[in-house]
Image (cartoon, coloured by chain):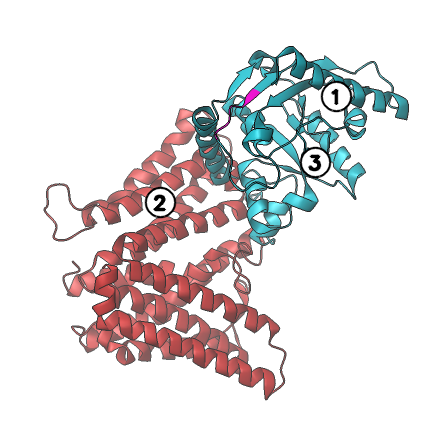
Amino acid sequence: MKKWRYDSARDLDQAPIDRLRQFPREPDMLVYGLRSICALIIRGLLRIYNRFDIVGHENLRTNRSLVIVANHCSHLDTLCLLAALPLRKLHCAFPAAASDYFFQSVPRLWAAAVLVNALPFGRHSRTRASLTTCSDLLANPGTILIIFPEGTRSTTGEINDFKSGIGALVAGRDISVVPCFIDGTFRAWPKGRRVPTPRKIRLIVGDPRNYRGRQTDKIDICAIAAELREAVSELRQTNGSH
Amino acid sequence: MSPQNALHDPVFRAYFVIVLVSLAVGGAVLAFVRFILKKETASMFKTYWSWILMAGIGLVVVFLGRIPTIAGVTLLAIYGFKEFARASGLYRDWWMTGAVYAGIVTVGVASLVSHPRGEEPGSGWYGFFVAVPVFAIALILLIPILRNRARGELQRMSLAIVGFIYMGWMFGHLGFLANARNAYGFVCFIIFATAVTDVAAFTFGKIFGRHPLRSEISPNKTWEGALGAFGVAMILPWLLRFSFPFFGPRDLILTGLIVGIGGQLGDLSISVIKRDIGTKDMAATIPGHGGILDRIDSLIYAAPLFMHMAGYYHPLK
């Protein structure tokens, strides 16, 4: 008889916490199941508690890789963007989350890795390595990357400058970038507040853009970041923010 | 079983004290080795802290009653199977793992519900419980047919069936024991006795171990450790006779044999799987112990054999 070939998981010798910390994670049926159930509950809660609604939904319906770029003032932003995706896309959607904030304490780590399938992103160190991880992920068709290029939650509700890393990620590549504006999360759950309040939240999804023809030098990269910020603030103006 | 019963049950209260005393004695021995003999004990202390945590969780779950006990055993079985699936690579096949999870949950449900026409006394549907493997295996065999695929399917089916029978059904007997008339005695005894036997095997092996027990399967186990554990297992039922006052000498000897031999066979049979896959531990879930599966492996043999032995000589429910 020939030997059976076993194909063990690569992280057998790691403790459960370390398994959550590593990226890419091994797919796990129980985790996927739990994530899907929680996503349904979160969608329901957002609809009822925050009267969540989405404009321009159809811009996210594609089987190609996408980068979603949005303004950031609350943890609710990630949940809203995930709620806008079709449920079957949930496990190939990766919100980039600060590794210094989300990948340290155990409850946050658990929420980031299990509930939102976050990608650990180094804000202060290993930024280049994180960007490489992102662009490797985008090479698989159907990957959705959720990025908040401001780099942190805004404390005023205004849109801060976008970091140039987003430009480096998409310049010269045939990848759709979808700018989004999330309205209301700053009032619903600003930084520093313990529990969200039932304020109305609205997600405006812009038209996809493509930066295939752009150079990857410093000037173009910064220009792309500025253009994307412009696109997001335009969405804010055209949809009558208050 | 319920919190009120547990509070007034002399057997549960006795086990509560026994577990605390055993942990204290274990801690004292470790402290002696560490501070008087000045030996390196860091890894043993890690194992010991995990024992304390597991003992605490186990006591709370049994205290809470029948439903939490069965639910806890089902969760352990699910997690144990998950470790097996990750180690053997079966976890990549969602249909197969899904079928096994469904089977394990069915074992739990069969332990929870009563006979639908009331033909069995008490809770737990024994007739269905022992028949669950038929349905689970039928489901597993159905999967390749449904997806019209044959290549490599025998390996997947075999792994799924072994996984279900070992971690789901055989281990699930521990949950069904919670339906017994003498639930506290049976559940507490079998968990405590297998744990003590494991520790005894380790200790005797460490002190006297010379001759390898099964060199091709588990290089660290020795005949000395196995015999020491067997001796301890033969004495335990007599010492803890209050857990089953209706057991005669024959039953006590059989119980000793089941814990002493069955417990170690369970350990070795998981070692066979690990050895063939080529991994040392199934996972790294419990610090100092390895995976959940490395901890519950002796119960995989001991719990079903003990339950059917007790049920053969005395009415179980």
Q: Which residue is mark 1?
A: A229
Q: Colour of chain B?
A: red
Residue A71 lies left or right of residue B170; in this view the side is right
Q: Which quarter of the rendering shows the C terminus of chain A?
A: top right
The stretch in magenta equals: A198-202
Q: Residues within 10 Å of mark 1 (few under 14, many from 20)?
A: many
Main secondary structure of the magenta stretch: loop
At 26% from the left edge and 55% from the top edge, which residue is drawn?
A: B66
Q: Secondary structure at mark 2?
A: helix
What shade does chain A have? cyan
Task: Determine if the magenta segment contains residue A201.
Answer: yes
Q: Nearer the viewer, residue A218 or B135?
A: A218
Q: Nearer the viewer, residue A117 or B317?
A: A117
> What residue is drawn where x is 39% and y is 43%?
B161
Tags 3 and 2 on a common chain: no
Return the residue nearer the eye: B307 or B268: B307
Decide which of tag 3 and tag 1 comes sooner along the chain: 3
Give the residue number, with chain letter if any, for mark 3: A152
On the same chain, marks 3 and 1? The answer is: yes
